[in-house]
């Protein structure tokens, strides 16, 4: 399990990019369509992921990458309430649970190779 992203949902991607990229000087690492942009954090392997199309009830939080999201939850069954079971994303699966304080914690894998 490795912290991969800090997730920030936004209602205005352009305004968020104006702050984080243009004002604070973070470099774009990648984009997915018109809704999601990752920004590299200097001196860190973790990226800031800004998403203009957040799922309902998803808030800011860490995204941990694991080998297999379904296996991760099976291994930790009962340790938390799984809020959003694993669902398909490009290249793998993603899920969400909330910690004891009610904060979203995201788990994702990239278990499938991208189709060309």
Image (tube, rainbow, N blue to C red):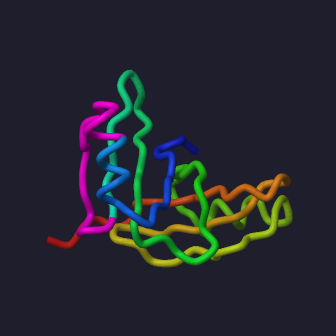
Asked which quadrant contains residue 60, the reply is bottom right
Q: Is residue 46 above or below residue 113?
A: above
Q: What residue is rendered at 37% in x and 51% in y? A: 16
- Quick check: 102 left or right of 61? right
Q: Residue furthest left?
A: 116
x, y percent for residue 47: 40, 41
Q: Determine if the magenta segment contains residue 114.
A: no
- Quick check: 3 left or right of 35? right
- Quick check: 65 left or right of 103? left
**Who is closer to the viewer here, 111 or 4?**
4
Asked which quadrant contains residue 86, the reply is bottom right
- Residue interval drawn in magenta: 20-35
Q: Is residue 68 above or below residue 90?
A: above
x, y percent for residue 4: 47, 44
**Who is closer to the viewer here, 98 or 50?**
50
Q: What residue is rendered at 40% in x and 32% in y? A: 45
x, y percent for residue 32: 27, 64
Placement of the N terminus among the 4 image quadrants: top right
Q: What residue is rendered at 85% in x and 65% in y? A: 78
x, y percent for residue 43: 38, 21
Q: Determine if the magenta segment contains residue 30.
A: yes
- Quick check: 8 left or right of 60? left
**Who is closer to the viewer here, 42 or 73?**
42
């Amino acid at each position: 399990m490795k912290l991969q992203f800090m997730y920030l949902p936004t209602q205005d991607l352009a305004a968020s990019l104006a702050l984080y990229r243009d004002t604070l000087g973070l470099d774009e690492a990648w984009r997915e369509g018109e809704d999601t942009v990752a920004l590299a954090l200097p001196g860190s392997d973790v990226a800031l992921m800004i998403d203009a199309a957040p799922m309902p009830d998803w808030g800011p939080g860490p995204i941990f990458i694991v080998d297999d999201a379904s296996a991760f939850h099976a291994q930790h069954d009962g340790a938390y309430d799984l809020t959003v079971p694993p669902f398909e994303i490009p290249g793998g699966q993603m899920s969400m649970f909330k910690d004891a304080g009610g904060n979203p914690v995201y788990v994702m894998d990239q278990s499938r190779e991208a189709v060309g």
